Amino acid sequence: MNTSTALDTLLSRYSLGVKHLTEPAPDTAQLQTMVAAALRAPDHAELVPFRLVVVREHARDRLADLFAEHALRKGKDTEGVAMERERALRAPVTVAVLARIDLGHPLVPAHEQWMCVGGAVTNFLNAAHALGFAGKMLSGDKARAPHIAQAFCEPGETLVGWIALGTPTRTPHGEARKDTTQALRFW
């Protein structure tokens, strides 16, 4: 990929909410390409402080049950519970993002491992965009709910959230690039 094409891909990527994602979803080969991109995040050689778990079609109802149970625990009414269940089912593909941070690693402090997790998510979403898909990272209080984390995590892992993926039903209209002066300063 030439520099211009790579920059165009990066600068044109945008996040879309789950309600703006539809089928077709990425297939297994496309998901593997996205994971290959995630593995290119800065990782200090052999250290891979993340794991990605695709919620397969037959497991989507289980995810919806977990979201509904969370809504009940938060005291939501019947409508709120139904809305949370629908959120779990809306994206064509959902990928759980799990972090495996080694607090005692002799060479890589925890904050650098967390940066790798963020880089992996970014690379994953950029690869999805390059393949014609859109996605969005979702987190919030559901990612911190012990009963939901327990369903995904192995010992020592933290549920970071989910990536919702699908084919975009729209593109942003007239959305200007963010002002770089807010993010870049000179010392």
Image (tube, grey):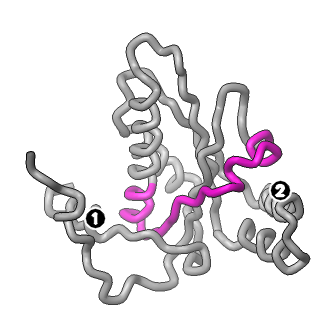
Compared to residue 187, the image places residue 132 above or below, namely below
Residue 133 in the image, given as x and y percentages of width and height: 47, 68
As shown in the figure, which amino acid type bears the numbered disc 2?
Answer: Leu
The residue range painted magenta reads: 125-150
Residue 147 in the image, given as x and y percentages of width and height: 82, 45
Residue 143 in the image, given as x and y percentages of width and height: 67, 50
* Residue 67 appears left or right of 117: right
- The residue sitting at 42% across, 31% down in the picture is 111
Which of the 4 image quadrants contains residue 106? top left
Front residue of 24/187: it is 187
Residue 66 badge = 2
- The residue sitting at 40% across, 56% down in the picture is 127
Query: Magenta stretch containing residue 142, yes or no?
Result: yes
In front: label 1 or label 2? 2
Compared to residue 108, the image places residue 32 above or below, namely below
Residue 117 badge = none
According to the picture, the residue beneath numbered tag 1 turns out to be 9
User: Which quadrant: the C terminus?
Assistant: top left
